[in-house]
Image (cartoon, rainbow, N blue to C red):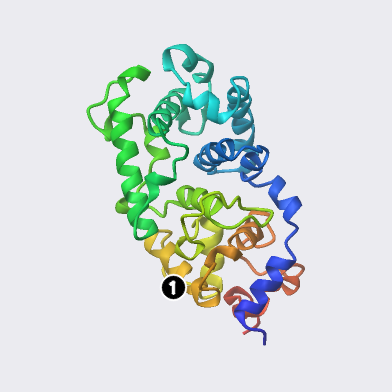
Amino acid sequence: MHSLKAVLDLLLAGTDRSLRIAADPVHFPRSYSKPADQELAALIAAFLAYGRVDLFRPVLREVFALLDRRGGPEDAIRSFQPELHGDAYRHLVYRWNRGVDFVLLFTVLREHLRDQPSLSPLFAGPTVRQGLSRAVDRLRATSVKHAKECGLSAASFRELPRGFQYFLPSPDDGSACKRWNLFLRWMVRPTDGIDLGLWKEFSPAQLVIPLDTHIGRIGRFLGLTTRNTDSWDTAEDITASLRKLDPSDPLRYDFAIAHLGISGACNGKFQAAVCPKCPLERWCVVRNRQVG
């Protein structure tokens, strides 16, 4: 039997990157050439990367079309003024996100980009968890400070709209922070046709996997974790298992594993016409239960 690393290498090699990127939110930052535009586009795309791809893609297209009218993500956000530019975004709706959430988000990002070429200093820390917790705390504080500028009244982060709160989960709350970790993967992993490799000061070895339902389910099928909840601890657990296979780049398999689920090739049940063709078949507990 092949080792788990060998079968994950087969899965990665067999993933049609061009096809899957077209169905992945990383498509949006990759459509820009300027690193500063890529960074901000990646953050916005990651924040909306929940739910069905066919539902959040049109919203992202509209957001970026509006930003592009003002020179692209960097120029538009660095010069963003809610009273002048906010009305263009107030009609936006995606699940529990509303236009005012984008207005406040762009105002907060504007403040953190003052005199800074990048958002990367926000995330500095000895571990991803500590750096991310620190970044979220600062972004939350800034959002409360500038809420009134955006037509909101809030004395604390928890008084801000639910949709905006959803933009800023923290590992300190137990959240898996899938969208944050997705953004960090795009920023930190070296350019490989998928990720962007913009933040050289961070190591890919430090990253934590962006844990969604697909990664959680397939991770359990492969024995990468025994935890039953999709929490920060589970994300670190799966990452630790993958780090044993590739200590310097544990997230190199993330895109391929996630798209095995996103594509529908793995739906959590044994499929006689599908499962035997999967490189992971002999490692999968679903297959083993079926034939055992």
Left or right, 261 with reference to 229: right
Farthest residue to the top: give it. 84
User: Image quadrant for the C terminus?
Assistant: bottom right
Q: Is residue 231 above or below residue 7?
A: above
Above or below for 108 versus 179: above
Depth check: 209 or 81 in front? Answer: 81
Look at the picture and state if 175 lies above or below 27. Answer: below
| Left or right: residue 216 compared with residue 70 | left
Q: Which residue is disc 1 drawn over?
A: 226
Q: Judge from the rendering whether residue 70 lies leftward or rightward of residue 152; answer left or right.
A: right
For image coordinates 47% across by 26% down, the residue present is 78
Question: In x, y percent, where is residue 224?
Answer: 50, 73
| Quarter assignment of residue 233 | bottom left
Quadrant position of the N terminus in the picture: bottom right
Give the class, few, some or many, for how many residues have Cα within 10 Å of label 1's Cα (few <14, many ≥20): some
Residue 109 point in image, percent of width and height:
42, 32
In the image, residue 69 sits, relative to residue 166, either above or below, namely above
Label 1 sits on what residue type? Thr
Residue appearing at x 32%, y 20% in the figure: 152
* Residue 120 percent across, percent down from the top left: 44, 45
Q: Residue 277's spot in the image, x, y percent? A: 76, 72
Q: Looking at the image, which is closer to me, 116 or 133? A: 116
Q: Residue at x 32, y 23 (%)?
A: 147
